[in-house]
Image (cartoon, rainbow, N blue to C red):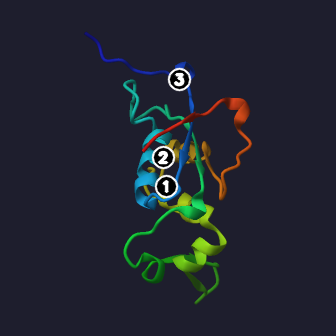
Amino acid sequence: MSTFMPKAGEIERKWYVIDAAGKPMGRVATVAADLLRGKRKPTFAPHVDCGDHVIILNADKVVLTGRKLEQKYYYRHTGYIGNLKATQYKVLMATRPELAMELAIKGMIPDNTIGRAALTRLRVYKGTEHKHAAQKPEEYAL
């Protein structure tokens, strides 16, 4: 019996909706990263981009456990000497909760061309509304 090797043109992509309200951010991020990579499919191959599209709703209602709101920081550098900007997650979750969820998922995706292509299929929304009803996404239960 030979090993099945998926081709890039033969991949069927589905659309999934994940409701993140009241769930820990890390749990939602791991499920989303697995769906984006296609690791929950029986035809998964690490050298082929075979993931699905993921829509995450209620990113502002996600839960950070422990004291992460006070102790965890998001760092970015402007490119100038000495300009490292630190943002506390309490402020980040209040202003841009979509970015916090995207960063959590980005850390679980490989840093190569397949990972960058997978991140283009991620959509994160603050509320319960999304504009992808025409794609008929399925609800994915955690």
Q: Secondary structure at mark 3?
A: loop
Q: Is residue 16 above or below residue 23?
A: above
Disc on the earlier residue, 1 or 2: 2
Q: Which residue is at the far top? A: 1
- Cα–Cα span, label 3 and label 1: 22 Å
Mark 3 or 2, nearer chain start:
3
Choose the circle earlier in sequence order: 3 or 1.
3
**Residue 87 quadrant:** bottom right
**Viewer-nearest residue: 2 or 32:** 32
Q: Which image quarter is the N terminus in?
A: top left
Residue furthest toward the left?
Answer: 1
Query: Looking at the picture, how far across and down is residue 25, in whole percent?
Result: 46, 60
Q: Please provide percent x and percent y for residue 23.
A: 45, 57
At a point 62% along the width and 45% down the height, the residue shown is 120
Badge 3 density bin: few <14, some 14–19, many ≥20, Cα 10 Å:
some
Point out which mark residue 32 bears. 2
Taking 18 as reference, is 13 above or below it? Answer: above
> Of helix, strand and loop, which one carries label 1?
helix
Depth check, mark 3 against mark 1: the one in front is 1
Find disc 1 in the rendering and name its residue.
105
Amino acid type indicated by mark 2: Ala
Question: Amino acid type of disc 1?
Answer: Ile
Mark 1–mark 2 CB contact (< 8 Å): yes
Q: Look at mark 3 in the image and give the residue it sits on.
A: 11
Assign a secondary structure to mark 2: helix
